[in-house]
Image (tube, rainbow, N blue to C red):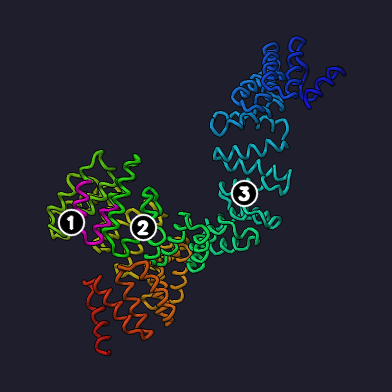
Amino acid sequence: MRVSVLLASLALGVVPVGAGQLPDSAAAYPFLLGGALLADGESEAALAAFAEAAALAPEDPWVHLEYASVLARGGRFEEAAVEARIARQFAPSDPEVQRIQARIAMNLADRNPAARIEARLAFEGVLLAEPDDLESLVALGQIYLGESSPQRAVEVLTRASGLRPGQPMIEALRARALVEAGDSQAAESILRSMLAAQPDRLDSRLELAELLSNRGLHFEAAALLAEAPESQQPSPELRRRRAVELYLDGDLPSAGLVARGLVAEFPDNSAARALLATIEQADGRWTSVLELIGDVAERTPLNDQLNLLAVRALERLGRIEEALAAMARRQVALQAAGRLGEAQLVQASAVLLASRNDRTDLAVEMAAKLFEAEPPVDPEILMQVRLLVADLEYERRGLGPALAVLGAADSSPAVAKRYELAVRAGDAPSAARWRQQLESGSLEAGLELAAAEERLERFAQALPLIERALAASPESSDLRFRKATALERSGRFDESAGLFETLIASDPEHAPALNYLGYMWIDRGAEIEQGLALVRRALQIDANNGAYVDSLGWGLYRLGRFAEACEALERAVRLLPNDSTVLEHLGDALLALGARERARDAYRRALALAPEDTAGLAAKLAGLVGNS
């Protein structure tokens, strides 16, 4: 041990390794005594001896360094850091002094940002003297990651990897640094190499699966997790992650099988129940969702995920009053927890839920409470509610009351809503005035006007406004998507398709564009296979989107694959039970299979949801009745 080395060195008249030189004669005795006491386990007495030595040799870096080390071994890192700084003051370039200072500072870094900087500077000093010091390279990699400097972390960790090839901790850190530096593929390569060498490294397998998932490769991620050694298959985390990846890949039966196993093994685990409920809701199995999490959600109103699932299920099952009651409980709980902003957002969401389920009077009443709330509601939330209630009041009482809801608000969304309502009411002078105000304003004002025209289904009028904004931001995927949809809705199909193709070429993960163009081609009967391929790509990105599932089913129907079409469209109806177009598509597919009664039921439900589109549906129903 260190004290025996010092005593032997003193007896032999040699300088101890790494200690520079012994303290002067006054400090030598307490210094050596401190070491002896420490060896005998008398820590407090040893510290007192080292403190005396430091006082007798105030400019000796090695005394202060030894004192710092002993303090650190006792967990007294703040005091140790002070002594290490004194040692550094008198030996500023010595790598051993810098190394110990850095080690001590690292123990304070999590709770003291200044200590992290101190550790970084000290380790960087060590590297200047010893470029291949492995400890410093690895520590700096961790520090640079903590300071959001991933490229610097990659540089030092790559050097460390060269010194210790394949060392798991270094490679794991290097992979993380590469991910944060934007080089996920290099990180994947490292993790694959680690797994090839050590297939039982569950942490590496989970990290690689996460990287694959982040790239949208959910099938590959699920397969990787399934390839884990048999001894790891019971791992709850591995099973949970596999269920998530299967769900994201759209393989709901397999995802449900894995998640049901977790719920069976851990019936009281709310996270496992929430996972299975999420999978069930993606398949539109709303009763099952409530059976899984309804009671738990009611008992834990602050749990975001559970309450969102429960409210959504109640709404889809038509139990609107229960859904609103659940939201009210959550609002009260959030207020009691001091989370007022979230409580107001729930209150605003309840207004929206009531309005879309024909509880117009209740929605207006709830909104009035929001308008008068103390403290005042967030202005952005309040404006969204005002825009909604303006529409409701227009339907209930006409233009005047609707405009009164908007008050004197002069923001672009408010002016655009006034314009929209005036057009609907046939008030041309007012509409012209508000249109002029928006047209002469900013690009954002012009886009609000375009949105109003889109809501009015006047897409030809929206186009120039979108194009003006697009000229200022030609790479905007959102604006290109809006222009392409406006072109299609204006009957300019070829131009729309060309713009969609350009958008997809530059932004291949733009799922709405993939689905829109795919559905266009399918619905027009041209390039059905190509359109279906685009829809499948959209589903790879967002596997549980009801509109995309409908597009898939419609494409299969147009190809004459009626049984597959019915399967997809039945799922689409579970996801979008109030969408008349999806129900009509299902009716067409059922009729093609000869399921006339079920087709008739689908058409009737569609007609009830879209009474304004009666001609086509009424003809289909009449045909069924006439041929029955």
- Percent position (x, y) of residue 543? 45, 65
Q: Earlier in the sequence, mark 3 or mark 1?
A: 3
Viewer-side residue, 614 vs 308:
308
Q: In front: 317, or 377? A: 317
Q: Which residue does the numbered mark 1 point to in the structure image? A: 361
**What kind of residue is marked 3?**
Ala
Q: Amino acid at mark 2?
A: Ala
Q: Is residue 591 magenta?
A: no
Secondary structure under tag 3 reads helix
- Where disc 2 sits, the SS reads helix
- Disc 2 from disc 3: Cα separation: 39 Å
Q: Where is mark 3, residue-wise?
A: 175
Q: Residue at x 49, y 65 (%)?
A: 256
From the viewer's perspective, is the residue at label 2 or at label 3 nearer?
Answer: 2
* Magenta span includes 368: yes
Closest to the camera, between mark 1 and mark 2, is 2
Residue segment shown in magenta? 349-369
Check residue 310 in the rendering and tell me which mark sits there, or answer none.
2
Q: Are marks 3 and 1 in contact (CB under 8 Å)?
A: no
Marks 3/1: CA distance?
57 Å
Left or right of residue 495: residue 76: right
In this image, 7 relative to 117: left or right? Answer: right
